Amino acid sequence: MLIHPQFNPVALQLGPVAIHWYGLMYLVAFGLFYVLAMKRTTQPQFAARGWAMRDIEDLLFYGVLGVVLGGRLGYVLFYTPAHYLAHPLEVFAVWKGGMAFHGGLLGVVLAMGLFAWQRKRSIWDVTDLIAPCVPLGLAAGRLGNFINGELWGRAADAALPWAMVFPQSRTDFPRHPSQLYQMALEGLLLFALLWLYARKPRGLGQVSGAFLVGYGVLRFSAEYFREPDSFIGLLSLGLSMGQWLSWPMVVVGIVLWLRGREKTA
């Protein structure tokens, strides 16, 4: 079995300023989004509706706010509300970690809704544009989790060739490197499928619905290999918090996709 390499979480030290790998992964994610969204605006179905490259710069600004604020508040509200209720000032201590994808997703949806309202566009027109640009950023985030040796997986058979011991878990038995599973599934695979699907014109909201279904299903599946948060454990029906937050995404995604069959962009 393998041992986690124990990377130094600090990628670069400039005097008192420490640049962490996880922070760099956020920059990579935003950079990939910018490049891919620019590419999307050149596709005929979006160019015909007046999308221009300058719109992407504003979208990125709104998206960064949605990801950071939503991700942090999602972690506070979904995972550790009692702790932050007792220590409210720690809500702002983002350097201590604590971000939730589902909260970030809600934050982005609200940010995109504000952008759509200001530009007098349908919110689904906006989310259909950006949805295929998101998964590679998620892959970068999961790689950052792996570098940090956090969010490790559940116990694995020692005979599994890639079973790995994570010293940060304070256990000496092998685990699934679930961060890499999620990087491959929710990141690389979802990107490939969604990018190919979105190349052709689709009904309004269908690309957004496909993203929600795809992410929800893949995240739900990957959670069977990921160790539940120690302060929460497994919930009803033996499901993790991540699974309970993922299945509503699938339901909403199916509704959006079916609705989009009758609506053009």
Image (spheres, helix red, strand yellow):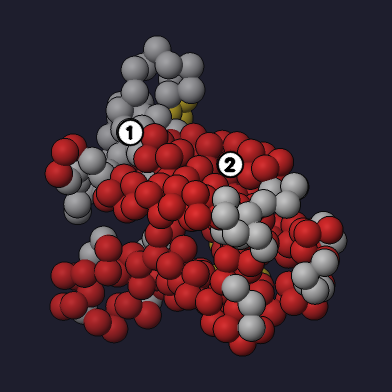
In the rendered image, the vertical position of residue 62 relative to residue 43, given as above or below: below
Spatial CA span between label 1 and label 2: 18 Å
Q: Mark 1 highlights which residue? A: 224
Q: Mark 2 highlights which residue? A: 190
Q: Which residue lies furthest to the front in this view?
A: 262
Q: Which quadrant: the C terminus?
A: bottom right
Q: Which quadrant: the N terminus?
A: top left
Numbered circle sitting on residue 8 = none
Looking at the picture, tell me which residue is in the foreground, 89 or 42: 42
Of labels 1 and 2, earlier in sequence is 2
**Mark 1 near mark 2, Cβ–Cβ under 8 Å?**
no
Q: In the drawing, does residue 240 fall left or right of residue 146?
A: left
Choose top left, top right, bottom left or bottom right for residue 79.
Answer: bottom left
Choose top left, top right, bottom left or bottom right for residue 149.
Answer: top left
Looking at the picture, tell me which residue is in the foreground, 234 or 3: 234
Looking at the picture, tell me which residue is in the foreground, 232 or 259: 259
In the rendered image, the vertical position of residue 63 relative to residue 156, given as above or below: below
Q: Residue flagged by tag 2: what amino acid is it? A: Leu
Query: Is residue 146 visible to us here?
Result: no
Looking at the picture, tell me which residue is in the foreground, 10 or 48: 48
